[in-house]
């Protein structure tokens, strides 16, 4: 149970309810994946869980910036066109782009290719910053 300086997920500005007592934590931006066309999956938590990154939902509007409005997100003009759609339908991919918030991290494999996670234009996270351009790549 959270102490006086912490709050539960259900009361956090970064948490999104998806079904009774369960939701997605959108505090952090997606990590860089090891393969192309990887979809960002937000961690699920229960309403009563808690962590040290808690921000009371009435004290911030940070999660209100969607990916399409974030300066770190880019979408090809026709959306993303993956070879393997994985667990997403075609209409999701046409509204998807890549989150470039974090640089790829070094690892032990030489010549490792860099990739960025795919997110839907209506997704959001706690590291979003408002953009000044359109975000569509030509």
Image (cartoon, grey):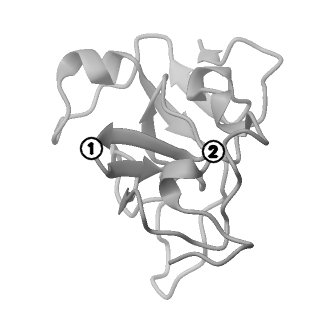
Name the residue rendered at 40%, 57% in the picture. Answer: 47
Q: Nearer the viewer, residue 120 or 60?
A: 60
Q: Can residue 133 be seen from the camera position used here?
A: yes
Question: What is the quadrant of residue 6 in the picture?
Answer: bottom right
Q: Of circles 1 and 2, which is in front?
A: 1
Q: Can residue 26 be seen from the camera position used here?
A: no
State the residue lying farthest toward the bottom. Answer: 108
Q: Residue 50's spot in the image, x, y percent? A: 52, 69
Q: Residue 58's spot in the image, x, y percent? A: 72, 38
Q: Nearer the viewer, residue 1 or 27?
A: 1
Please report whichever mark, 1 or 2, sits nearer to the chain's N-terminal start.
2
Name the residue rendered at 62%, 32% in the picture. Answer: 73
State the residue lying farthest toward the right. Answer: 132
The reply to whether dot 1 and dot 2 touch (C-beta < 8 Å) is no
Q: Residue 86's spot in the image, x, y percent? A: 16, 42
Say left or right for 10 vs 18. Answer: right
Q: Which numbered dot is residue 129?
A: none
Q: Label 1 vs label 2: CA separation?
A: 17 Å
Say left or right for 113 vs 125. Answer: left
Secondary structure beneath dot 2 equals loop
Disc 1: CA contacts within 10 A as few (<14), some (14-19) or many (>=20): few
Q: Residue 127's spot in the image, x, y percent? A: 70, 47
Name the residue rendered at 78%, 27% in the picture. Answer: 130
Q: How many marks?
A: 2
State the residue position of label 2.
Answer: 13
State the residue position of label 1.
Answer: 20
Secondary structure beneath dot 1 equals loop
State the residue lying farthest toward the front. Answer: 4
Disc 2: CA contacts within 10 A as few (<14), some (14-19) or many (>=20): many
Residue 33 vertical position relative to residue 40 in the rendered view, above or below: below
């Amino acid at each position: 149970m959270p102490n006086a300086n912490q709050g539960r997920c259900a009361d956090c500005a970064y948490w999104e309810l998806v079904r009774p007592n369960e939701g997605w934590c959108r505090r952090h931006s997606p990590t860089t994946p090891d393969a192309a066309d990887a979809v960002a999956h937000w961690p699920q938590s229960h309403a009563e869980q808690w962590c040290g990154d808690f921000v009371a939902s009435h004290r911030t509007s940070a999660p209100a910036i969607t990916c399409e409005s974030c300066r770190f997100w880019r979408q090809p003009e026709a959306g993303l066109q993956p070879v393997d759609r994985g667990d997403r339908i075609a209409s999701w991919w046409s509204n998807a782009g890549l989150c470039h918030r974090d640089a790829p991290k070094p690892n032990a494999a030489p010549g490792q290719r860099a990739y960025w996670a795919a997110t839907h234009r209506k997704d959001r996270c706690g590291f979003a910053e408002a953009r000044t351009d359109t975000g569509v790549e030509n």
